[in-house]
Image (cartoon, rainbow, N blue to C red):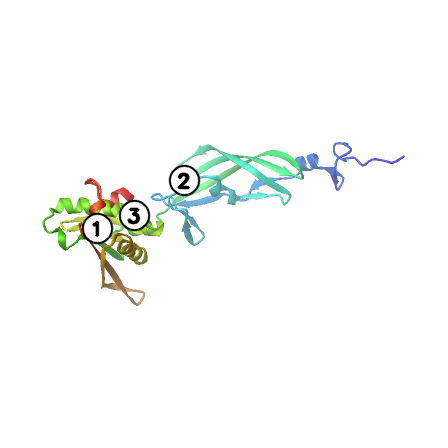
Amino acid sequence: MVEEEFCVVCGATGRPLIDGVCAPCAADRTRLVWARRQGSVTICPHCGAREVRSHWERSGSSTVLTSEDLLPFLEFHPEVGLRRIRWEETAATPNLRELRGQAHLVFRGIPRDVEVPLTVRLVSKSCPDCSRKSGRYYTAILQLRGGADDRSERAAERRARLEEVWKELLREARPDSRKALSWTEERPEGWDCYFTETLPARSLAKLAKERIGASLTESSSLAGRKNGREVYRVTFCLRFPRTVDARASSPSTAAPAEMEQ
């Protein structure tokens, strides 16, 4: 007579065993998922960026915590595969969030639903980009001006025309160029657009020259010293003749920066 192996916990036969225990019983006796420590998430209140180690990422995200924020604080048994997890907020204070996760797992081929509690501390901190913008910091100015053929054009008409060209330009610009735009100021002759980084401003100026046919001049001025090195601010002057800007649509009164920020 051949004796059939059975689970030493539940007595079931015909199941794969590891150390004499079947998968369902092993799952019942094993910690499958747990929070390794209280979490801490640093979020920029202005743009939603997260501080991860020594850098910031996910600019433009919601300030609401998501699985992407919470999963790094969980530990899983080596034999566990996570299918999905749903989070529910159970309590909240200005700086703390109490959450309960309902994790759908697979352990040794057996699906399991496991509940895991997690406490997360929220830290509100402005990212470098937003700090520079709020402090009116800039390294470059992109000036939007008319051409030599706009002398009969009134200032308000010129600004409206340049605004439409600017909107068209921003639609084609790279994301880093749009992100570096801090604010704009209205001028009698057009607009001054201030950037927190010079390279994105230069990229946008070159795009205007290549795609729209604007003339471009570049100049720089000494703004001070930082860490023993001279710091310069760069001005890019773009001139858009009326013949080039004829594709602009009806005038609008909104400033360019307001539409993009």
State the image quarter where residue 249 is shown: top left
Q: Is residue 261 visible?
A: no
- According to the image, label 1 marks what residue? 244
Quadrant holding the N terminus:
top right
Instruction: Report the side of 186 relative to 196 (left or right).
Output: left
Residue that appears at 25% across and 43% down: 258
Residue 161 position within the rendered picture, expressed as x and y whole percent measured from the top left: 19, 45
Q: Name the residue type under label 2.
A: Asn
Q: Which mark is residue 170?
A: 3
Mark 2 element type: loop
Q: Name the residue type under label 1.
A: Val
- According to the image, label 2 marks what residue? 95
Sequence order check, earlier mark of 2 and 3 = 2
Q: Decide: marks 1, 2 in contact (CB < 8 A)?
A: no
Q: Name the residue type under label 3.
A: Leu
Residue 137 position within the rendered picture, expressed as x and y whole percent measured from the top left: 27, 54
Residue that appears at 57% across and 38% down: 83
Sequence order check, earlier mark of 1 and 2 = 2
